Amino acid sequence: MAYLSRTQLEAMGFKSLGREVKVSDKASIYNADMIEIGDNSRIDDFCILSGRVVIGQYCHITPMCLVAGGRPGVYLSDFCTLAYGVKVFAQSDDYSGETLVNSQIPKNYKNERFAKVTLKKQVIVGTGSVIFPGVTVEEGCSVGAMTLVNKSTRPWGIYAGNPARRIKERKKDLLELEKQFLLEKNQ
């Protein structure tokens, strides 16, 4: 995978750009002036980021993900991972048939939903999953592959299904590993 150089990244005009950031030269970045990327985070091939997006430290957005922040924004806290093909939406059209839809239609004919999406620290979202506007995935949650997350979660759970449901507790062992990792990193 080829990554953009620091000079190329800075030329894109990100709102903020941490150290050791890697962005694939095959990723599509729109509204870079609304996007913040924290230290040691990575965005892979064929990802699309648009609108307000804030990415913490040590986050990984793997190939073919879509992060559509729109105006309200998508916020990934530290140590978050989006596996292949995850889609995160902070806005959506009204599919009921009561209004017109799509980006070619003036707003007065539409009823779009705009709501912030937050993924808290140590969240991993499995391949092919979709997260809807207004959702908060609480700290430590693991979202299984192909899961539809249309409601906020509770911390430290493993969620799966359509719609997502909590199937068991997630272990917190990784918190000790995180401490060790950060201590070693800062030496």
Image (cartoon, rainbow, N blue to C red):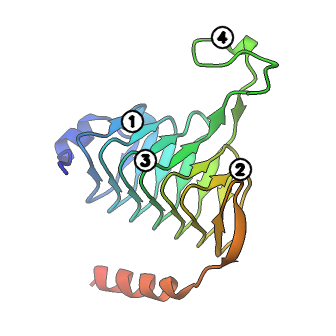
Q: Which amino acid does label 1 sit on?
A: Ala
Q: Which amino acid does label 2 sit on?
A: Asn
Task: Name which residue lies at 74% across and 12% down.
Answer: 108
The residue singled out by tag 4 in the image is 106
Which badge, 1 or 2, is on the more N-terminal residue? Answer: 1
- Which labelled disc corresponds to residue 46? none
Which badge, 1 or 4, is on the more N-terminal residue? Answer: 1
Task: Name which residue lies at 66% across and 53% down.
Answer: 149
Q: Nearer the viewer, residue 13 or 178?
A: 178
Q: Position of residue 141 (x, y in %)?
A: 60, 70
Q: Nearer the viewer, residue 44 or 4?
A: 44
The residue singled out by tag 1 in the image is 32
SS under mark 2: loop
The residue singled out by tag 2 in the image is 150
Rendered image quadrant of residue 73: top right
Measure the alpha-carbon separation of dots 4 and 2: 26 Å
Task: Name which residue lies at 63% across and 49% down.
Answer: 117
The residue singled out by tag 3 in the image is 36
Which badge, 3 or 2, is on the more N-terminal residue? Answer: 3
The single residue placed furthest to the right in the displayed view is 98
Say if 63 sits above or below 154 in the image: above
